[in-house]
């Protein structure tokens, strides 16, 4: 499935996500932390993560009109661990009525192997081989 939008969580995901979007020739949306600080806050979608790999509950979001119903969204990040960030990204994409393709990351550090299939997730290297 070809993405129409690449979604990258700040900050390392913004870097690899933007590069991936440019290579694919599709749009890029940055998933920001502390999204409640937006001035036009009613036009944002926001969600709080489950505890991530540092036991944080992050508030992520982006402007709702950047992801539209009918978009096919691929999340790109450098690393996945608990999957809290990716699961929040999926929920936000679904809040917009768009289609979630999955997550593509460089390092697979998944603590719950079921997420590899359920999200789904594809990675370039397993953390146990670093
Ligand atoms: O699967 P999870 O447990 O959610 O962890 C994965 C997230 O953690 C890292 O980001 P980090 O929060 O360290 O932010 P940074 O990119 O700004 O360093 C990484 O870049 C992912 O976005
Ligand atoms: N263990 C880890 N080290 C560096 N970045 C990470 N992102 C998620 N888990 C990480």
Image (tube, rainbow, N blue to C red):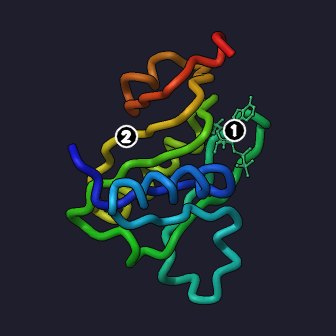
The crowd level at tag 1 (other Cα within 10 Å; few <14, some 14-19, many 20+) is some
Q: Quadrant of residue 10?
A: bottom right
Circle number at residue 51: 1
Query: Residue 5, labelled with which disc?
Result: none
Residue plotted at (64% across, 18% down): 127
Q: Position of residue 11 (x, y in %)?
A: 68, 56
Residue 79 in the image, given as x and y percentages of width and height: 62, 35
Residue 121 lies left or right of residue 24; in this view the side is right
Under tag 2, what secondary structure? Answer: strand
Q: Which residue is at a point 64% across and 88% down the rendered structure image? A: 39
In the image, residue 86 above or below residue 83? below
| 5 relative to 44 in the view: left or right | left
The vertical placement of 25 against 114, above or below, is below
At 69% from the left and 38% from the top, the residue drawn is 52
Indicate which quadrant contains ligand 2: top right
User: In the rendered image, which quarter is residue 112 located in?
Assistant: top right
Sequence-first tag of 2 and 1: 1
**Label annotation for residue 102:** 2
Q: Are marks 2 and 1 in contact (CB under 8 Å)?
A: no
**Measured Cα–Cα span from mark 2 to mark 1:** 20 Å
Residue in the image at 63% along x and 29% along y? 81
Q: The N terminus is located in which quarter?
A: top left
């Amino acid at each position: 499935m070809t993405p129409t939008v690449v979604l990258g969580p700040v900050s390392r995901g913004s870097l690899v996500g933007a590069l991936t979007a440019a290579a694919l020739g599709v749009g890029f949306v940055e998933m920001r932390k502390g999204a409640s600080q937006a001035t036009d806050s009613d036009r944002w979608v926001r969600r709080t993560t489950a505890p991530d790999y540092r036991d944080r509950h992050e508030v992520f979001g982006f402007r709702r009109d950047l992801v539209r119903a009918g978009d096919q969204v691929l999340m790109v990040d450098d690393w996945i661990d608990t999957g809290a960030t990716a699961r929040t990204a999926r929920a936000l994409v679904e809040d917009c009525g768009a289609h979630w393709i999955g997550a593509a990351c460089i390092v697979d550090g998944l603590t719950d192997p079921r997420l590899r299939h359920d999200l789904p997730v594809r990675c370039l290297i397993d953390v146990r081989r670093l």
